[in-house]
Image (cartoon, rainbow, N blue to C red):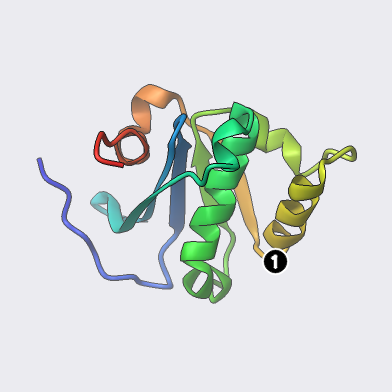
Amino acid sequence: MACILSHLNLSLPIIVETDASDYALGSVMSQVNDSGKHPIAFDSCRLLPDELSYEIHDKELLGIVWALKCWRAFLLSLSDPFKVLKDHSSPQYFMSSKALACCQAHWKEFLSEFCFTITYLPGRLATLPVALSHRDNM
């Protein structure tokens, strides 16, 4: 079944799913209503040359930062926290970490503007963001 984009309804819960591959980032913003989860927006981008050498945990964090930058206006207007779903567990521990590299400290400062939780989602269930980050034509 094909995904059909829904209109944003600020009164419904928001879910942001992100994924990072060796060369790209993918993300999906969705909402949950009575009939299930419906996508609102999709996005993907190629990693910059400097970003290609990042460790996977940094690429996964960059995926969250990038997605939240894309949809910043929407996400900051929410009255309730939104959920970020990741197929990698390291971002869950990032926000409480004390020892950070320079770029990680900048990311943490940016992420502190938002009210969200990070939840682990097994990769086999994160099909949309994985498909976007693994496109051949990136």
Residue at position x 66%, y 30% from top?
90
Q: Is residue 48 above or below residue 69?
A: above
Q: Is residue 56 visible?
A: yes
Instruction: Please report the residue visible at 10 percent of the width from the left and 40 percent of the height from the top.
Output: 1
Front-most of residues 37 and 70: 70
Q: Is residue 110 left or right of residue 18?
A: right
Secondary structure under tag 1 reads: loop
At label 1, the amino acid type is Glu
Q: State the residue at coordinates (45%, 24%).
A: 122
Whether 30 is drawn above or below 55: the answer is below
> Quarter-wise, where is residue 135 in the image?
top left
Q: Residue at x 43, y 71 (%)?
A: 11
- Residue 48 place in picture, x, y as percent: 51, 46
Number of on-image labels: 1
Decide if residue 18 is on the left or right side of residue 100: left
Q: Position of residue 15 (x, y in %)?
A: 45, 52
